Amino acid sequence: MISEQVRAEINGAVKSGERQRAAALRMVLSELQKAAKEGEGDELAVLRRERKRRLEAARAFEDGGRPELAAKERAEAQLIERYLPAELGEEELDALIAQAIADSGASSPRDMGAVMKLVMERSGGRADGRSASARVRAALERSSDA
């Protein structure tokens, strides 16, 4: 379980005096435990959500002229990424998108929802929703132009 790994890393961070790392790991563990109590058994979904929150916060801090806080949020996002499976490469994602378009019979950008649903299900959490969405949109626009 990921929770156990995080717990062990918290102990290591505390022993080595890494306060910020320990605090970030405690926050992740808290979210994992909260999700488990609420019946959300998918730890990877929780980690993806928390990573996304950190990246959004980093962008907001950058836009607000607070680069030191943005760097802290990015560091926490990278810490969370260590527990997630590696993301699909561009070629793998493009192949998955092409297959999803073929399987769904999509022919225009109006069919994007059906294609995205298949892509995200089949990627097993290894595809970033934002980049997948952009690639699906581009692929559907190309197919509707042809």
Image: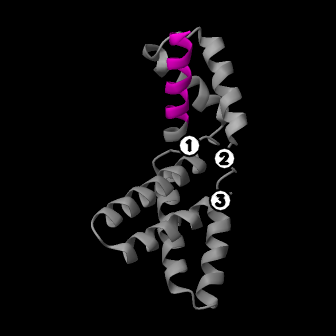
N-term mark: 2 or 1: 2
Residue 6 pos. (x, y %): 62, 68
Residue 142 pos. (x, y %): 54, 18
Please give the name of the residue rendered at 55% of the width and 46% of the height, measured from the top-left corner.
45
Q: Residues within 10 Å of mark 1 (few under 14, many from 20)?
A: some
Taking depth in this image into account, of 118 and 71 the one nearest to the observer is: 71
**105 versus 130 height, above or below:** above
Question: Quarter holding the N terminus?
Answer: bottom right
Q: Which mark is residue 83?
A: 3
Q: Residues within 10 Å of mark 3 (few under 14, many from 20)?
A: some
Q: Is residue 27 magenta?
A: no
Taking depth in this image into account, of 111 and 123 the one nearest to the observer is: 111
How many marks overall? 3
- Could you tell me if the residues under marks 2 and 1 are in contact, i.e. CB atoms within 8 Å? yes
Alpha carbon of mark 1 to alpha carbon of mark 3: how far? Answer: 15 Å
The magenta-colored residue range is 132-146
In this view, the residue farthest toward the front is: 146
Magenta part, dominant SS: helix
Q: Is residue 145 magenta?
A: yes
Please give the name of the residue rendered at 58% of the width and 86% of the height, measured from the top-left corner.
14
Q: Which mark is residue 146?
A: none
Name the mark nearer the viewer: 2 or 3: 2
Q: Which residue in the structure is indicated by mark 2?
A: 87
What amino acid is at disc 3?
A: Tyr
Q: Quadrant of residue 15?
A: bottom right
Assign a secondary structure to mark 3. loop
Question: Quarter holding the C terminus?
Answer: top right
